[in-house]
Image (tube, rainbow, N blue to C red):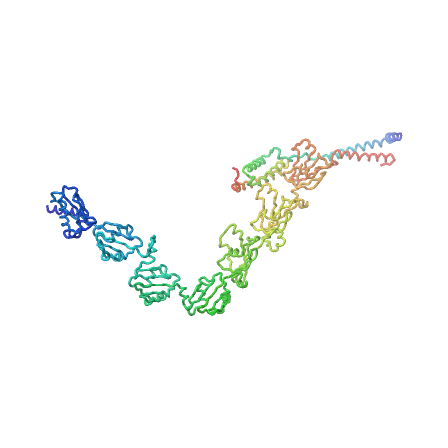
């Protein structure tokens, strides 16, 4: 039976929860407090069998008997008070029981938390739990000055950050019911409500308004106020401030500790590692990192470098620093600097001129002395102030000549390209032959010509590495194209024959023309003002030069105009010769194979050009037709083929019958002969008879006269 | 008149042999004349073929070539191979005339030239056709 009791007790303990086990106080003596929850049990009274919390006034509200003040009473006394009060309305309270179910803690969390207001927690809850239930700390909360105000009016300020660092409950405050936890705002947040970035806030330092904080400002990346910790050094604080900037004068860092100024030379410390050179900070120390220029200005050994240098400014001229040292520390002259006219402004007001270019080229001489207070001025190159073209020595200049808008000598830098040079020279002129840019590469006292086809590169593109590399001393020549065809006469000498083409004969302006492989046959014919009215378009001849052996191509430009077939146009190259013959040329120039000879009784017997589209009728018409003595019914055609043959044509009969089957074939090379009527059969007989009559008469007369024969 | 009669009579009576000889010589001269005329009157036969392109074609090879030319023309040779097509047309006309004119040897050579043009069109057409967007 006892065993069952112990088992039942264990089950009850488990079911009653951790709260019952966690209550670490003596119920008989510990007074009840606000937030405690009592359980009243009276069998048979459902209205009483439930939990009754003690409210903020320390009272418990019971059914039918009203509220009852129980705060501050131990549990036995509270139980008796409840019994007495209930006895006024209930009877048979022998079985009444009152127990403490759990302890609760009611506090308020205000200030820089995300959800300020009352929170209810277990009885042993801490400040951290209260803050967590209030949504956590808001950005900008001042952690080292949290306040806990008790109900009796007393307040405790404690360093919550210290508690977070250590975890020691002693560093926190034990909460009591109805305490108010107030989280103040950091002074860094200012007096205006804004949303800010926590990183920015942290970068400004974590010291707040604490007088023990260390203030760091000047040439550091994140100036601010940082919390002081014992044993912190200047270097530690500078690291928290993001380090020094590039302009910081690390030799002259100023530290005020305990009200005494100290100069900290971080350069020396970093060079030597000597801990004696390290300055340790005290609470409330101030660290100022001055700007380097300001330091140089304040020094007694300042030299100023101005004008066209990479880093102009004030320099500290240490003993032994020469003119070149100072100029090199300033980054040296820029490409825009006029290095022939460096000016040194002395302290005494005098001005010295120094020609650095000449000094470097002659590799001799002496640099000017520089004293503290002197100023070196490097002037800019200005076109209008150039004293002489001699200012740029040949070893640093590129000569650009020819058809450019601004040919001349240009100072050269190897990072530039040919395109930079042409652009600087104003670009090619309207008549520049950019397809034949000539570059004279001069190295080791030897000039080697190269060529570059800029036109082709611009049209077709290509690797930039294929563009000739220009160096100082080179000569770039852009040839000039003829302005108009008349220039062929005046500029032909300057025009290279390798880049010329010749056109002669029946064209508007025959001559030698500039030509490049990008042009074609029609380009050159058109440039010569085209064929004249008497040009024989069917027999244009092109002599292709520059090939092995000789080759003459016959071009039928008339057929091209008929068909538009581009393949009829010849491929011409520089050096070729185009001859456009005259239609009325000498008969020796007319090829026999392309003509028909018309002879006999026609108006204009001659050789006539003939093609296979024509017929005998066309030929007779071209020859003016048969004349009055022509034997029109016996026109003869001789075909000069592989097997020559002669055929007759009766023009009269053809004109009457229109029988095309009786028209003989005529081809180029054949012969047409129109006989005279005197060559006809009847005429010849008549002539013969007419010749016999006088002969007979003569013979009779001689016989009559007695002459014997 | 009297004199004339006497003279004529004399020719016949007194010198009968003289008239005979005259008549004889005229007959001989006429024979010579006719014989000469027969040689002078040997003119060539009448020609043909001057407009052969308007008359029917009898040669089988040339007919096949003409069909091939027309096929190229339908395939767009007028744009893709205009020069070769025109030259083929000219050679066809020339050959048709030669065939009708009896110039057989020359017509064979010209038909060989037509084959050259046909081959050139055959090579050029596939290269040019996609570029000129010819009708199918």
Q: Residue furthest left?
A: A1
Q: How many marks?
A: 0
Residue A361 or residue A98, whichever sits in front:
A98
Residue A687 or residue A412, whichever sits in front:
A412
Q: Is residue A590 left or right of residue A294?
A: right
Give the residue drawn at x 11%, y 43%.
A92
Q: Position of residue A356 (x, y in %)?
A: 49, 66
Give the residue drawn at x 57%, y 49%.
A519
Q: Is residue A568 visible?
A: yes
Q: Residue furthest right?
A: B2
Quadrant where the C terminus of chain A sits is top right
Residue A81 or residue A238, whichever sits in front:
A81
Q: Is residue A448 visible?
A: no
Q: Position of residue A641 (x, y in %)?
A: 65, 40
Residue A669 or residue A321, whichever sits in front:
A321
Q: Position of residue A87 (x, y in %)?
A: 13, 44
Q: Is residue A94 left or right of residue A192?
A: left
Asked which quadrant contains residue A149, the reply is bottom left
Q: Position of residue A620 (x, y in %)?
A: 68, 38
Quadrant where the N terminus of chain A sits is top left
């Amino acid at each position: 039976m006892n065993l069952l009791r112990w088992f039942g007790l264990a089950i009850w303990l488990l079911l009653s929860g951790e709260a019952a086990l966690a209550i670490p106080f003596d119920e008989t003596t510990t007074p009840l407090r606000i937030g405690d929850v009592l359980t009243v049990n009276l069998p048979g009274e459902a209205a009483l069998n439930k939990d009754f919390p003690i409210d903020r006034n320390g009272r418990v509200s019971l059914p039918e008997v009203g509220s009852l003040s129980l705060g501050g009473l131990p549990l036995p006394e509270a139980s008796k008070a409840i019994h007495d009060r209930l006895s006024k309305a209930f009877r048979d309270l022998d079985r009444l029981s009152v127990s403490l179910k759990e302890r609760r803690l009611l506090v308020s969390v205000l200030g820089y938390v995300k959800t300020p207001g009352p929170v209810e927690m277990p009885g042993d809850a801490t400040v951290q739990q209260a803050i967590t239930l209030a949504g956590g700390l808001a950005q900008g909360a001042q952690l080292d000055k949290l306040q806990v105000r008790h109900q009796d009016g007393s307040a405790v300020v404690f360093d919550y950050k210290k508690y977070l660092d250590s975890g020691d409950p002693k560093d926190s405050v034990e909460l009591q019911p109805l305490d108010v936890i107030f989280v103040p705002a950091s002074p860094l947040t200012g007096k205006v409500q804004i949303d800010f970035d926590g990183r920015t806030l942290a970068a400004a330092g974590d010291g707040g308004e604490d007088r023990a904080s260390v203030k760091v400002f000047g040439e550091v990346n994140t100036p601010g106020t940082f919390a002081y910790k014992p044993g912190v050094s200047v270097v530690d604080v500078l690291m928290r401030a993001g380090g020094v900037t590039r302009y910081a004068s690390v030799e002259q860092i100023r530290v005020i500790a305990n009200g005494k100024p100290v100069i900290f030379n971080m350069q020396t410390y970093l060079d030597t590692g000597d801990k004696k050179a390290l300055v340790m900070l005290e609470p409330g120390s101030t660290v100022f990192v001055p700007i380097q220029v300001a330091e140089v200005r304040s020094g007694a050994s300042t030299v100023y470098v101005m004008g066209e240098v990479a880093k102009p400014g004030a320099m500290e001229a240490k003993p032994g620093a020469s003119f070149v040292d100072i100029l090199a520390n300033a980054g040296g002259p820029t490409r825009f600097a006029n290095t022939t006219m460096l000016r040194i402004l002395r302290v005494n007001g005098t001005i010295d001129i120094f020609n650095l270019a000449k000094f470097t080229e002659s590799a001799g001489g002496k640099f000017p002395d520089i004293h503290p207070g002197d100023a070196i001025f490097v002037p800019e190159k200005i076109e209008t102030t150039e004293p002489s073209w001699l200012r740029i020595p040949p070893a640093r200049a590129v000569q650009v000549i020819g058809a450019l808008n601004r040919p001349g000598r240009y100072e050269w830098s190897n990072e530039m390209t040919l395109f930079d040079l042409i652009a600087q020279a104003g670009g090619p002129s309207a008549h520049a032959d950019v397809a034949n840019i000539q570059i004279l590469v001069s190295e080791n006292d030897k000039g080697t010509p190269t060529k570059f086809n800029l036109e082709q590169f611009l049209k077709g593109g290509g690797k930039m590495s294929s563009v000739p590399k220009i160096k100082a001393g080179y000569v770039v020549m852009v040839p000039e194209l003829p302005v108009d065809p008349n220039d062929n006469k005046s500029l032909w000498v300057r025009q290279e024959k390798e880049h010329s083409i010749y056109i002669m004969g029946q064209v508007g302006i025959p001559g030698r023309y500039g030509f490049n492989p990008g042009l074609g046959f029609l380009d050159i014919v058109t440039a010569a003002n085209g064929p004249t009215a008497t040009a024989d378009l069917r027999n244009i001849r092109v002599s292709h030069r520059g090939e092995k052996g000789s080759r003459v191509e016959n071009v039928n430009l008339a057929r091209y105009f008929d068909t538009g077939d581009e393949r009829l146009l010849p491929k011409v190259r520089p050096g070729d010769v185009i001859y456009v013959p005259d239609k009325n040329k000498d008969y020796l120039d007319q090829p026999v194979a392309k003509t028909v000879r018309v002879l006999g009784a026609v108006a204009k017997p001659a050789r006539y050009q003939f093609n296979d589209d024509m017929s005998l009728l066309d030929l007779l018409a071209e020859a003016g037709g048969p004349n009055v003595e022509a034997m029109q019914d016996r026109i003869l055609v001789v075909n000069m083929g592989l097997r020559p043959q002669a055929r007759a044509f009766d023009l009269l009969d053809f004109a009457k019958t229109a029988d095309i089957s009786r028209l003989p074939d005529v081809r180029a090379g054949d012969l047409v002969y129109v006989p005279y009527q005197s060559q006809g059969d009847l005429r010849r007989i008549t002539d013969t008879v007419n010749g016999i009559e006088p002969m007979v008469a003569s013979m009779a007369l001689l016989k009559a006269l007695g002459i014997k024969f | 008149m009297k004199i004339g009669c006497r003279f004529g009579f004399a020719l016949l009576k007194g010198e009968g042999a003289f008239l005979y000889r005259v008549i004889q010589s005229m007959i001989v001269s006429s024979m010579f004349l006719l014989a000469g005329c027969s040689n002078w009157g040997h003119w060539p036969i009448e020609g043909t073929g001057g407009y052969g392109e308007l008359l029917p074609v009898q040669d089988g090879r040339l007919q096949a070539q003409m069909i091939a030319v027309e096929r190229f023309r339908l395939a767009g040779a007028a744009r893709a191979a205009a020069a070769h097509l025109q030259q083929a047309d000219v050679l066809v006309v020339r050959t048709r005339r030669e065939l009708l004119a009896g110039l057989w040897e020359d017509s064979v050579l010209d038909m060989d030239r037509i084959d050259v043009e046909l081959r050139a069109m055959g090579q050029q057409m596939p290269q040019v056709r996609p570029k000129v967007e010819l009708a199918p």
